[in-house]
Image (cartoon, grey):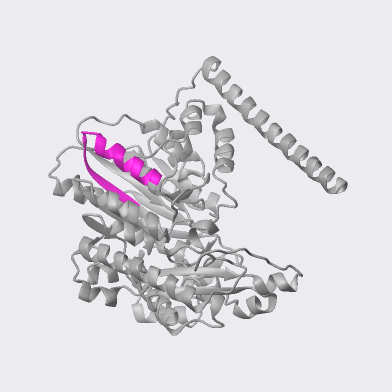
Amino acid sequence: MIVLRWFKNALLFIMKEIASFLIKIVMVMIILIILLTVFVPKTPVEKAPIRKNTYIELDLSNPVGERGSLSIFSMEGEKVNFYNMLNYLDKGKNDQRIEGLILKVDSVALNRAQVEELGRKIKEYREVGKKVYAFSRGFQNRNYSLAVNADEIIMPPSRGAGSNISGYFMELPYMKRLSDKIGIKYDVIHVGDYKSYGENYVREEMSPEFRENITRLLDRIYYNFVQDVSVSRNIDERTLSRKILNGDFVLADAFKMKQEKLVDSLMYYHEFLKERKIANITTLGKYARSVVGHQSSGKKIAVIYGDGEILYSNSGRGAQQSITPDTMISELDMAVRDKNVVGIVLRIDSPGGSALASEVINAKIRSIEKPVYVSMGGTSASGGYYISASGDRIFAERDTVTGSIGVVSLVPDVSELAGKLGIKIESVQKGKLSGIYSITDGMTKEERERIYESSSKIYSEFKERVSSGRNIPMSQMESLAGGRVWLGEEALEKGLVDGIGGLQDTIKILAKDLQLSEYSVVEIRRENPFEKLFMNYKYLENFYNKLNSILNMEINGKKEMLESELIIKPVTYLPYKI
C-alpha cells in the first residue's frame, strides 16, 4: 500500500508539473502578443506593381478551402479561400494589364465542384480573348478535367512525363474477418438499405445496394469526363471512351499523349515561357495585393461556410475544422442582425455527421425570414443535405455528391478482445437498458431494437424536413431516401436541388431574385482572434499559419473524426469520398 500511495503521489506530481509548464507557456505567449500589439508598428499591405502583358500563374497543387482565411496575406499561403480566388480571377479577366493565365496542374487539390466552377472561369478568359495555358508533368482524370479548358496543353518532352488517364478504380477494406480474429465486433444499425456507413465492419464483402449506388455514381462521373474531353479536344466520344477503357492512356508518355491529340505541345517550362514570349508572371496572391479594395456600402449578400463533419460540439478542434450549431447559428445571427444584409448564401461542403446537430441547424435556417440559398460544394450528403434542405433554393454542380438520406448507429464491442488480453470487465448496473451503449458488453436483442426504433424516428424526421423543404410528397420520399446517393444532375432531375451552378452562380441568382442592381458580398465567420491580431503584421504570417495549424489540430491536412460524435450516437454520414 505504501508503494502504491508513493506511485500515486509521484504521478500526480508529474501531472501537476506538466500542467504548470503548459500554463507558463500559454502565459508567455499572451504577454508576447500584448507586447507586439502595443509596441510593434503595423505593416501596411504593399501593393505589388503589375506590368502590362502579365500572366497570372495558378499553382493548384495546394488545397483551396471554402472557408479558408480572410486575411489578404493568406492568398499566398495554404489557406486560399476559393470564393476570393474566383473574385480575383474576375478582376484579372477585366484588367488590361493581365494577358492571360498559366495553370500549373501537376496535381489538382480541388474537389469536383471546384474544378467545374474554376473551369468555367477559365473559359471566360478565353471568351474575352485572353490566353490560357495548362502545363503538367503528368495527367490523371482530375487534373486533365481542368486542363482541357485551356487554349493549349503543354507537357515536357520526356518519357518520364506521362498519363494515368483511365476509367475508374475504387477499393475499400472490409474488415469483419480481421475484427473477428482480434476480438472486436460491431453492431451497425442502418435505417435505409443503401446507407453504407459501417458495413465494412460487419460484412466480408460489399453489399449489393452499396455496389449499385457507387457504380452508378462513378459511371456518371466517367461519362461526364469523357463528354467534356471529347468536346474540348474535338475527339469522337466513342473512340475516346474505347481507348480510355482499353488502357491506352495508362502509363502513356508525353509523346503518346501528343500523338493522340490530348496534348498540344511538348516543351520544358522555361522553353514554353521563351517560345510564347512570356516575360511577366505574377501569382494570384501578388495580384490580389495590387487590386485589394474596400467593400462598398449598401445592400449586401452574406456568404456563410459549412465545411467539414457536422458535430454537436467542436471540442476544441477549431471552428474551421467542423460544422457545429454553435458556430453556424452565431454566423447566421450576424447576418440576420445586419440590416444591410438582404440575403444569405450557405456554401455547404460536408459528408454529414451528427443527426442532432443537423436538425438544430436546419431548424435555425427555417426560422430566418431573409432568403437563404444553398450552394453545394464537392459533397453535400447525408447531414450536409439535411442542412441544405432548409434553404429556399439549392444549387449544385453536375458532379456534386448529395442525397444519402438515412441514419446509422455504430456501436463497437471489445469484450472478446478484453478477454484475450486477460482483462475482466466488471460492471455495476441499475435500471433496464442503462448499459445500452457499453462497448464491453454485447448488445442484447432488446437494446438493438430500441436503437433501431430511435434511429427510425430520426430517419422519419429527416425525410419530413426534406419533404417540407423541397415540397416533395412524403409518399415519394422513400424512393429518394434510404441512403441512396445522387450526383448533382441526378438530384436536379429528382427535385432535390433547383439548378446546376457554383457559388458565384448562386450569389448572382439570389441577387437577381431580389432584384438588386447594386450590392456587395460579405463573407461572415467568427474570427479567429490570433488571425485578427497577426493579419496586421506581415512578418508574423508564417508564425501565425503554423500556430493556427496546431490550434486547429491539423495532421497532414486530414481531419480527425471525433468518436464521441460519429460513433455510438445516431449519425447521418457518408463514409467515402469520390
Percent x, y for residue 531?
Answer: 48, 33
Is residue 458 magenta-colored? Answer: no
310 relative to 486, above or below: above
Give 185 or 350, whichever is nearer the viewer.
185
Classify the position of the C terminus by image quarter.
bottom left
- The residue drawn where x is 22% and y is 48% is 508
Q: Say whether residue 551 is left or right of residue 512.
A: right
Percent x, y for residue 179?
Answer: 63, 76
488 relative to 73, above or below: below
- Most distant residue in the top direction: 39
- The residue drawn where x is 53% and y is 57% is 564
| Residue 542 quadrant | top right
| Residue 375 quadrant | bottom left
- Does residue 276 show up? yes
Q: Say whether residue 220 is left or right of residue 316.
A: left
Q: Which residues are magenta?
A: 326-347
| Residue 330 quadrant | top left
Percent x, y for residue 100?
Answer: 37, 46
Give 573 or 302, whichever is nearer the viewer.
573
- Does residue 505 show up? no
Give 50 or 360, whichever is nearer the viewer.
360
Is residue 339 magenta-colored? Answer: yes
Give 289 or 302, whichever is nearer the viewer.
302
- Most distant residue in the left direction: 515
